[in-house]
């Protein structure tokens, strides 16, 4: 089940919300746990067992770690979590590479990937590490522990929760109609991002990337990757908006995960704005433990490259993702050596530089293999069939592209520049918001009901 489905919008969410608001406080965590497990089991009834095992294993390890800072329990807990991830996500990838390097022919039995396993695995690891560090106490209630790991609003696409950010809210939270209304508004905005912009961009991107790269013209190559650039941002940030909104409806405050990354002035700035929960996780649980920037420049560069290698690998079991991660890591290191703000002093030029690097990186992320990615980049930068008829340049694509460009940061930037007081600007926003939300919701449901293309891009995560 996904948020952008009529089953979720018309059945699951209204029923869960209705029962949740009628239930007494002491039963609400149990209700959310049952709803979350049902939500997960809807699409993957077998892999709910993996989820339950993860909950039980981390609960037990957390209790042992908390009793006397038991390092062995921490190691065992991390091994269990990484083993689950390794078996389902990376086993086939490792065997393929062993076969390629040694000439062996080890049989590979493909396993479907439990949706969201990368997200809840990282949440579990951070929980165990934070108990060992003394940042938080272990959760003694198995229901509350299960809710932390399986909470359905952020289960399949993040943001990645850290236990110390949400522990107090699991124990005690305020549920109000005003909060539910605010959450619903945020959810509708995210739904619109996903259905109205990302899905339309996805249709163009998937059609072009499905072509033989030798048949792709230069304009088509740019059209395909620009479509994917907007698809992944509005899809991913849309899901984060929906998660934050859903959390608000149930009384939870979930941290922001995106901050207009496509108006970033450098790759470093991009990663301050893109998938904030993931970059924060790697900073706290990998970069700093490796030494961060405390042991000289060379080790700092090494640590950064390790982090971005792992960032790429986290996204998928493919060398494409590794290259994508290292591509960003390389420019992060280069910007450490040559600060981009000093080299390119005008912000629009900084933004253009950043977007070119990001767009080229997305080619590796989207392509099915490295050879396709390299050939695709060649099509982008070596002119080919420039006068060919652009079949992808439809009215539908043009409208979606205009919306994408306007909504990726321009509206926010213009809003900040309006020379009115914050009070008046907020009054105008409050007056326009209801009509905007109803229009967005109506159009989103209309598109979903008409069986508009609605891909799910997190199956690799």
Image (spheres, helix red, strand yellow):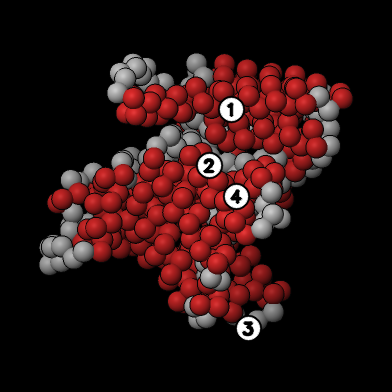
Q: Is residue 225 left or right of residue 313?
A: left
Asked if residue 206 shows in the view, the reply is: no
Q: Which mark is residue 419?
A: 3
Q: Which residue is disc 2 drawn over?
A: 310
- Decide: is 328 above or below 158: below
Q: Which residue is mark 4?
A: 303
Gap between marks 3 and 1, in whole Å?
52 Å
Q: Nearer the viewer, mark 4 or mark 3?
A: 4
Mark sitting earlier along the chain (4/2): 4
Residue 161 image offset from top left, x and y in percent: 66, 40
Indicate which disc, 3 or 1, sits on the residue closer to the N terminus.
1
- Give the spatial CA distance, label 1 vs label 4: 20 Å
> How far apart are the alpha carbons under marks 4 and 3?
44 Å
CA distance for labels 3 and 2: 44 Å
Residue under pointer 1: 82
- Asked if the residue under mark 1 is in contact with the one under mark 2, i.e. CB atoms within 8 Å, the reply is no
Q: Earlier in the sequence, mark 1 or mark 4?
A: 1
Of badges 4 and 2, the one in the foreground is: 4
Mark 3: secondary structure? loop
Label 3: how many Cα within 10 Å (few below 14, some 14–19, many 20+): few
First in residue order: circle 3 vs circle 2: 2
Numbered disc in front, either 1 or 4: 4
Q: Earlier in the sequence, mark 2 or mark 1?
A: 1
């Amino acid at each position: 089940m996904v948020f952008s489905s009529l089953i979720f919008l018309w059945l699951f969410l209204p029923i869960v919300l209705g029962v949740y608001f009628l239930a007494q406080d002491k039963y609400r965590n149990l209700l959310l746990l049952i709803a979350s497990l049902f939500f997960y089991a809807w699409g993957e009834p077998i892999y709910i067992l993996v989820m339950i095992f993860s909950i039980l294993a981390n609960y037990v390890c957390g209790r042992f770690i908390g009793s006397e800072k038991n390092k062995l329990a921490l190691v065992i807990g991390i091994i269990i979590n990484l083993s689950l991830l390794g078996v389902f996500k990376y086993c086939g990838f490792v065997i393929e590479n062993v076969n390629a390097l040694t000439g062996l022919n080890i049989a590979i039995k493909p396993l479907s990937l439990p949706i969201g396993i990368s997200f809840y695995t990282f949440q579990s690891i951070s929980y165990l590490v934070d108990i060992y560090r003394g940042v938080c106490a272990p959760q003694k209630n198995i229901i509350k522990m299960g809710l932390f790991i399986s909470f359905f609003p952020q289960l399949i696409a993040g943001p990645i929760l850290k236990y110390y950010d949400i522990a107090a809210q699991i124990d005690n939270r305020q549920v109000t109609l005003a909060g539910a209304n605010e959450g619903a508004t945020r959810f509708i905005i995210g739904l619109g991002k996903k259905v109205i912009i990302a899905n339309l961009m996805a249709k163009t991107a998937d059609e072009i990337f499905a072509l033989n790269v030798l048949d792709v013209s230069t304009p088509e190559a740019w059209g395909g990757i620009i479509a994917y650039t907007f698809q992944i941002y509005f899809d991913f940030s849309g899901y984060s908006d929906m998660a934050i909104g859903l959390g608000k409806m149930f009384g939870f405050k979930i941290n922001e995960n995106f901050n207009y990354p496509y108006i970033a002035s450098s790759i470093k700035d991009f990663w301050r704005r893109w998938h904030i929960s993931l970059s924060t996780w790697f900073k706290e649980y990998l970069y700093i433990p490796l030494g961060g920037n405390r042991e000289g420049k060379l080790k700092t560069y090494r640590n950064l490259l390790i982090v971005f290698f792992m960032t790429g690998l986290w996204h998928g079991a493919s060398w494409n993702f590794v290259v994508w991660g290292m591509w960003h890591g390389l420019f992060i290191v280069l910007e450490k050596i040559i600060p981009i703000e000093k080299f390119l002093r005008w912000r629009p030029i900084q933004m253009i530089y950043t977007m070119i690097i990001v767009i080229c990186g997305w080619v590796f992320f989207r392509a099915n293999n490295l050879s396709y990615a390299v050939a695709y980049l060649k099509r982008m930068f070596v002119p080919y069939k420039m006068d060919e008829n652009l079949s992808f340049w439809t009215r539908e694509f043009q409208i979606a592209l205009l919306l994408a460009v306007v909504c990726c940061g321009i509206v926010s930037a213009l809003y900040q520049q309006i020379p009115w007081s914050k009070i008046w600007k907020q009054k105008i926003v409050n007056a326009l918001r209801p009509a905007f939300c109803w229009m967005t919701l109506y159009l989103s449901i209309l598109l979903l009901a008409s069986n508009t293309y609605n891909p799910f891009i997190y199956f690799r995560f």
